[in-house]
Image: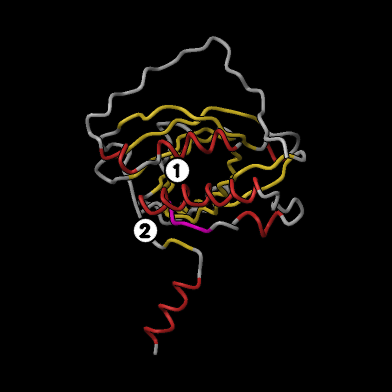
Amino acid sequence: MAIFILCSCATGSNREEEEISADLKSPQIELGEVEAQFETMLGMGKLVKQKVKMIYFPLEDAVALYYRHEFVNYHQFWSESGRELFIGSLARYNNDYDSRDLDSKSRLKNLNKYGTTRGYLIWQMLSITVQAKGNMDMELGYVFKDRAPYFTVNQKVAEYTDPDATSDHRQSMVITLYFTRAQAAEVAALFDSQLLKDTRMPKPARVETETPDTTVEWDEY
């Protein structure tokens, strides 16, 4: 009976359960850069667009989204099942978008409409400061911001306790990444399992720009 209840709970929830971990000293392959929107300090004002670097860690079979937010560096790691959920969730979002079936009012309900997956987070202010790390949930859904819909990844809290100083307990911030459909499609393309398994994949050329384009993008709806 207990097994049946556990199975029922697992299948009834729209959530991928998988604890993962990663090490920034592991071999890495830079996949390229994508763009996403972030909220400004304290969530005040309009969204701000910035670059997000995508890095593949072949030993862990994990892809990290590396970004900086409010003076903190974040590596947000995605497992294979999490990447598959992202791709499937984006397909569902695009279908809802094309069907004009997006709800502009229920923000909290829509943040996790397409499911939740387990991720792994490493965060620190500087390379010389404490490197905090821990598992966390990532919700997939959408949100309207300034009357425009965005596909979202809502990064929940990760907790870390320093093993050498148990009084040092840290919690990460809740951060939402906002993607237009085109931006999310670029992430999904780099999440493709076949692409990642190709060990002969060349490193993409780095494109340098003198002045980064920080214009926030949106989808007409």
Q: Identify the amino acid type marked 2.
A: Glu
The residue furthest front is 99
Residue, disc 1: 76
Judge whether residue 19 is colored magenta. no
| Label total for image | 2
Image height of 143 relative to 31, above or below: below
Give the magenta range.
115-119
Question: Residue type at mark 1?
Answer: Gln
Q: How is the image coloured?
A: secondary structure
Query: Which residue is found at the position 71% from the left and 54% from the top?
Result: 107
Label 2: which residue? 19
| Crowding at mark 2 (Cα within 10 Å: few <14, some 14-19, many 20+) | some
Residue closer to the observer: 137 or 25: 137
Residue 9 % position (x, y): 47, 76
Q: Residue at x 55, y 52 (%)?
A: 92
Q: Residue furthest bottom?
A: 1
Q: Residue at x 72, y 41 (%)?
A: 145
User: Cα distance, mark 2 to mark 1?
Assistant: 13 Å
> Element type at marker 1?
strand
Expressed as whole percent of the image width and height from the top left, the position of residue 71 reads 56, 32
